[in-house]
Image (cartoon, rainbow, N blue to C red):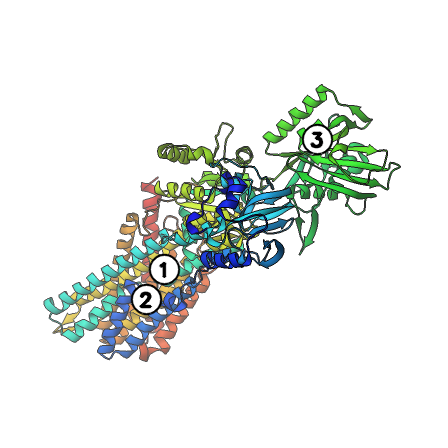
Amino acid sequence: MNKENIEINYHARSIDEVFEIFSSNKNGLSEKEANKRLEEFGPNEISKKEGTHPFFIFLKQFHSILIYILLFAAALTWYYEKMIDTYVILFIVVVNSIMGFIQEYRAEKAVQALSQMVVLSAKVYRDGVFKKIDSKLLVPGDIIEVGEGDRIPVDARIFELKNFRTVESSLTGESNPTNKKIDVLDAGVSLADRSNMIWMGTFVAGGQCRAIVVSTGEETAFGSIAKDIGVIKKERSHFEKKTSILAKQMGIIAIIGAIITFIVGFYIKGIELEEILFFTIASLVSGIPEGLPAILIMVLALGTTRMAKKNVIIRRLPAAETLGVTTVIMTDKTGTLTRNTMNVREIFFVKEDNVEVTGNGWEPKGSFCRDACNLSPLEEPVLDRLLHISAICNNAKLIQEDSRYKIIGDPTEGSLVVLAEKAGLKGDAMGEKKIDDMPFSSELKYRASLVSMIRSDSKEELYAVGAPESILERSTHYLSKDGKIKLTEKERKIISKKIEEMTSKAMRTIAMSYKVLPLKHGSLTDKLVNEMVFVGVVGIIDPPREEARESVFKARNAGIRVIMTTGDHKGTALAIAKEVGIADEGSEAFSEPELLEMSDKQFKKVVSDVNVFSRLTPSMKLKIAEILQEKGEIVAMTGDGVNDAPSLKKADIGISMGITGTDVARESSEIILADDNFASIINAIEEGRIIFINTRQASTFLITTSFAQYATLIAALLLFSFEGQALLPLLPTQILWLNLVTGGVAGFTLASEPGHGDVLDGPPRKKNENILSKEIIPFLIMLTIIMTTITLSFFSYHLNINGDINKARTAAFLAIASTQLFNVLNMRSMTQSIFEIGLFSNKYLAYSLGSTIILQVIAIYYLQPIFNFGALGYQEVIPIVLASSLVLWAGEIYKKIRYKVIEK
């Protein structure tokens, strides 16, 4: 055989055909042939993807028009031997680059995580001899054997089995164990329904089987997911695109402004070349908000810190802001909306009142309730019998690790163990001794245990647990508090009706029965399982999270659509969707086979209208995400299994589960929910919206500052240039200090601003909405004029009073710095008064403004040689500060007129 012979529909081929395709048989390959195939197909492993080298990540930080302009300015100052200016500019560039590098430095580990899920050893037949080998050495055509508790190392076609079941939730999303068989299946069945196949990375829940390997490494279902992840190109987030556009716009404005400055100064005002070049450098530096990259990173970093306190871990900073524009959440069911634990929720008896059971998860805590939750279960004869059967007729084990409980074995059987332990019953201390056991059979649809009864006079008892129809068929009586009573057709109909009712509520139903054996048998056969006494039916459910319904309601109120995409059955998916509010009573659900039969037009319409999809493969989830994105939706996709990895990476926002999530899902996502709580997503979306608001306010603040500085220089060029000389009111080093200190430290206040009002009240903003909207242009122009006027007024006053250029520049510096500080108060909210939101509602405000004032005092009075400042007395400082407060009062009046009068 060779690679060209390999096909995918082995489930639709007879086992003899599969043996023929792979030139193999039940005795396995020879070692010589296996080695030959190992060379041809390669080792059974997922190839690793190397991450980007840190050096290249660091270099990437210099790829920005703002950085290019600053480096050009540094080169000019170096050429004209303005070394202090050169060092200050380069310092700003390096600081910004280091901050960007730290935030972006993370490796792409999704494919590596896939490779870690492959087991280390496998049981294989070679030359007819059973042996253990490294799983990497398995090849197509090998014959393997797997049993209870094993992780499956390859994709394989089953040809022998005994009561064999697997747990495939990490691959298919199906939470219940899958019963396997060897029958040939239709070619069109979905991966989740290929019951004659086993898959790499899934687990054996019970029984054992022999199978022929059909795919290894990257040709397996896991491998195809790795390929999907590898070819999916993660587009830049909308936040990255918008900030990049903003940076380019500011860079272009700065360049155009510098050109205009040079033309006016050199050609119109006749200023000497070296003088106007230095003036042009100052205008170029003033037009660039150097603090913008640092502030934007700070806004994101502070937002992610707040999210972390709410159990939301951000792996990629821009994802935090993108959450705020999310319009669709694609969510899995198992482990996301539900708890991914099987719990007995209801117990039905033929004549006794039903019993409800409380408690969630595997922890054996809960109450048994009828009219009230004070029932003593072991004092109720019928309930006591059912609980003993639950504890004994079972192979699952409940263990505790680090204060958390987990189940070893079949999750359904595990739910019965937890049920018994809630009543205080444990299998090893109940007076029963298990003599023989018959594991669950997919053909017989029940499991049975033969028990020696220490606590009674009977010799032996037989317990049976299984599908209600199978148990009912083998029962002739039912148990009541008065003893066993003959089953009539009437009772059988009552039982069947109750089972239908439980099933409609997404419950898995398990019936229990017993009989007393007067003679010792010592072993168990199917022939003994007859004339049983029917005890009752338990309804088992993977319960929805308590917060799920409220979270879905909040999402809808925020204009966000929630879609369930699961590998589970349609009925279960729709029932859970209705319970949590994703679907209504009249809602439809579609499975993948139904979707595949649709035309493209029908399929796209269903994706637009329907909120519940079941039995989905990874590729179908990916297709749904792509269609939604084509329609302009911003898609957040939640998930925890391997099957979710491609969609997590393709989605605008991939959200994985921190507790139940696989490494693959976590490494393919931008966001991890540390508590696996769907409700945390809503908190994260709220923070995402706050991040955008803060980004807009911080950016507007910095740009207003830059515009005011630039306008001040241009006005000075026109008003204070004489005989080929131009008087600069602000030097490049002074401008850079302003941008670093006032723009940086004071800007921290805006980056840390809490949300004001209900930011979730209303739909998300449009994805193409720019950071700087047209609405703020009048506000920006007004503030620029006021700040420029105040700055030039005090520059001119002090220049005319004493003729000291350094003292005049100090007055101009203090004026523009003071107006910026008052503008910080303005920008805390673009729509609300500072007195409405509270002057100190942001706890960082006092620290930020205080630090800024201290740094400015140090620069003016203690770093005069570096910045060419002249000392000002308090009688000169006070008028400047008072006049600068006009910025705040003008802003208050503007907001009052614009948002309280006009828009009202």
Q: Earlier in the sequence, mark 1 or mark 2?
A: 2
Label 1 sits on a secondary structure element that is: helix
Going by the numbered disc 2, the residue's amino acid type is: Phe
Residue sitting farthest toward the right: 457
Question: Is 49 or 287 nearer to us in this picture?
Answer: 49
User: At x 69% / y 53%, what residue is drawn?
Assistant: 400
Question: Is 290 or 3 nearer to us in this picture?
Answer: 3
Name the quadrant of the C terminus: top left
Q: Report which residue position mark 2 lands on.
A: 62
Question: Is 354 or 28 nearer to us in this picture?
Answer: 28
Q: Which mark is residue 822?
A: 1
Can the viewer see residue 735 in this picture? yes
Going by the numbered disc 3, the residue's amino acid type is: Ile
Q: Residues within 10 Å of mark 1 (few under 14, many from 20)?
A: some
Instruction: Find residue 810 and report its horizontal and vertical position in percent.
Output: 29, 72
Relative to 89, residue 883 above or below: above
Q: Residues within 10 Å of mark 2 (few under 14, many from 20)?
A: some
Label 3 sits on a secondary structure element that is: helix
User: At x 40% / y 42%, what residue is drawn?
Assistant: 623
Q: Report which residue position mark 3 lands on.
A: 471
Instruction: Find residue 558 and report its horizontal and vertical position in percent.
Output: 44, 41
CA–CA distance between discs 1 and 2? 33 Å
Identify the image quadrant of residue 374: top right
Q: Nearer the viewer, mark 3 or mark 2?
A: 3
